[in-house]
Image (cartoon, helix red, strand yellow):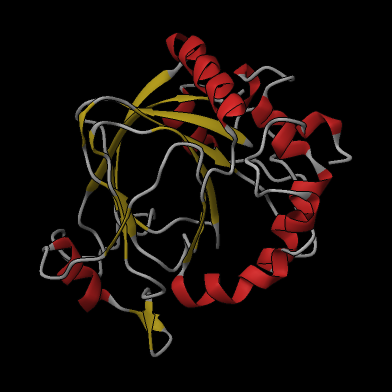
Amino acid sequence: MNDSRLKNIFGDAYTEDFFSSGSIYSQTLNEKGILIFNSFIGPDGLKTLQNEANELKEHSYKSSSEYNVYISEYDNAFSADSPRNRIMSTSKKCIPNDLIPTQSILQKIYDSPLVRSFFLDLLDKDEFHPYEDPLSSININYYDKGDALGWHFDNSDYTITLLVKNCIKGGVYEFFNDMRYKNDKEDYDLVEKILDKKVKGIKVDSLEGDLMIFKGNKSIHQVTAVEEGERILVTFNYNEESGVSLSEQSRRTFFGRIK
């Protein structure tokens, strides 16, 4: 691999040939709503990341947030217990980008032209840019016992995550693929069935070192509560336009500060 910054980071399957062929995975992502690249990070890189995450954890910010599935303001046109307004909750600890060392494997991956080009080809995008604010481009998320990520749609079309550490029990990712709209309108009926546990989604078994890309904006998803152990998940966050910052409200919620 010509990019020396990435040497010994990736698993054996992730060669320059792999990174030059992102578009061949696009159809699978569109059809299934999710891609998992197993052992994306090799054993040495994974050990380094786990050690780094453990050292940073004492500086993480603990947050508990409540929101509706759509991550939007309360809508008075619907009742409080409607699928539109029903309250979900999330609890976790988070390390913002400015606390991640500049020489971290995570920063090297995020900044790599090779990796970014792969994501652009796969997602059929023209450009990717980091967040303008110093906190939001890369985040390390820690889920301890009892922590969970409630049902929701993401604001971005696609979400890119890296599982650094898996918990022993619980912490299961579950989603319903590309189901947000029906006849170009929000499908509240299906969302209600999901929240009432009348239907079951696709559960994903992800392993340490796996990279996952999924349709976050159109596929409702959750992570069940951690029952035993600790789950550490990294999110790589890009924007199609430059100069974009995460909202101040979101920064206060997840990082406890705006800069």
What residue is at 42 percent from the left and 19 percent from the top?
61
Q: Which residue is more in the foreground, 41 or 172?
A: 41
Task: Work out which quarter of the rendered image holds the C terminus and state it.
Answer: top right
Q: Position of residue 111 (x, y in %)?
A: 77, 37
Report which quarter residue 68 is drawn in: bottom left
In the figure, is residue 127 to the left or right of 53? right
Up/down of 180 relative to 42, above or below: below
Q: Position of residue 130 (x, y in %)?
A: 72, 41
What residue is at 36 percent from the left and 33 percent from the top?
166
Report which quarter residue 227 is drawn in: top left
What residue is at 61 percent from the left and 17 percent from the top?
99
Q: In this rendering, does residue 240 appear at all? A: no
Q: Position of residue 191 (x, y in %)?
A: 24, 69
Q: Which residue is more in the foreground, 248 or 181?
A: 181
What residue is at 62 percent from the left and 40 percent from the top?
11
Up/down of 212 relative to 176, above or below: above
Q: Which residue is more in the foreground, 57 or 152?
A: 57
* Residue sitting farthest toward the front: 12
Report which quarter residue 178 is drawn in: bottom left
Total labels: the figure holds 0
In the figure, is residue 130 to the left or right of 218? right
Q: In this rendering, does residue 64 appear at all? A: yes
